[in-house]
Amino acid sequence: MDSFIAVIILCGIALLAILLNFLKKLPKFVFAFFAVSIVVAVSWYAMDSEGKKHTNSFLKSNTSIADSLVFMEVAQNLVISAGETRFSLPVFLKGKRSSDCVRMILESDNDSLTAQSFIQNVHFSLLSSDGTRVPVTWVQISKNEQFSFPKSFVLKIFFDLPESLNTSDFRCVVENNSEITFRVPEISVGAVPVSETNKEN
């Protein structure tokens, strides 16, 4: 339930209890319960609003960075079936970077796919040669006029890799927990240097 709706419902029930109290005396614990519940619900709403504010700010900033990336193609014509798929993925830019990004064009024959179900069921990570696994930082699904989601869309996956890399060769691990098979005609990699991030700020 949305936090704002919870506050409205609790206030409405509390008001009804106050009106009912004029007809029949209600126990004090009933009003104590509503008082505590409303305080908790208002606190929940305040935290929820603050979280959404930070999330929107984060997405706006990172979307601007993502749109300025320059990518280099590294692979073509890959198939991501249900289960786990791994493929080689070089990282070209060394030195201080704010993030590294993998850009994929994905195609499917599933009309019922949504962005939310995709993010919930398809997970990504990077695996280095020494066995270190790097989880994804955030994911961006692009739906512009050149593509028709969900039949064809651009996926950008961001990772925070260490500044000093022992290797530039990684394997991208895709855990596809859906029943959908994705065709990937193009995979590219890019990175955002720290200097670019400073310009955005």
Image (cartoon, rainbow, N blue to C red):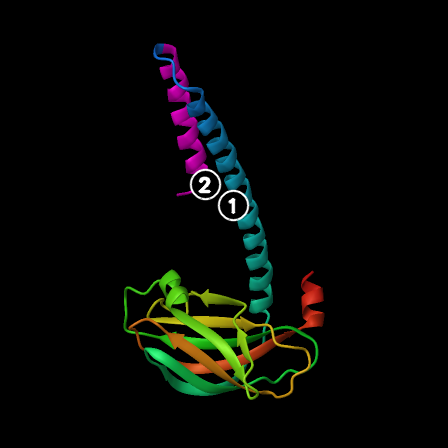
- Is 15 colored magenta in this rendering? yes
Q: Name the residue under label 2.
A: 3
Please tell me whether residue 196 is drawn above or below residue 75 in the rendered image: above
Quarter in which the N terminus is drawn:
top left
Q: Is the magenta region chiefly helix, strand or loop?
A: helix
Q: Mark 1 points at which residue?
A: 48
- Report helix, strand or loop for mark 1: helix
Residue at horizontal 55 percent and vertical 40 percent from the top:
46
In depth, the one of 61 and 171 nearer the eye is 171
Quadrant location of residue 192?
A: bottom right
Please tell me whether residue 50 is drawn above or below residue 4 in the rendered image: below
Q: Of the two numbered discs 2 and 1 on the same chain, state the one appearing first in sequence.
A: 2
Please tell me whether residue 128 is drawn above or below residue 197 in the rendered image: below
**Other residues around mark 2 within 10 Å, as few (<14) / some (14–19) / many (≥20):** some
Quadrant location of residue 121?
A: bottom left
Amino acid type at image mark 2 = Ser
Amino acid type at image mark 1 = Asp
Whether tag 2 and tag 1 are in contact, CB under 8 A, the answer is yes
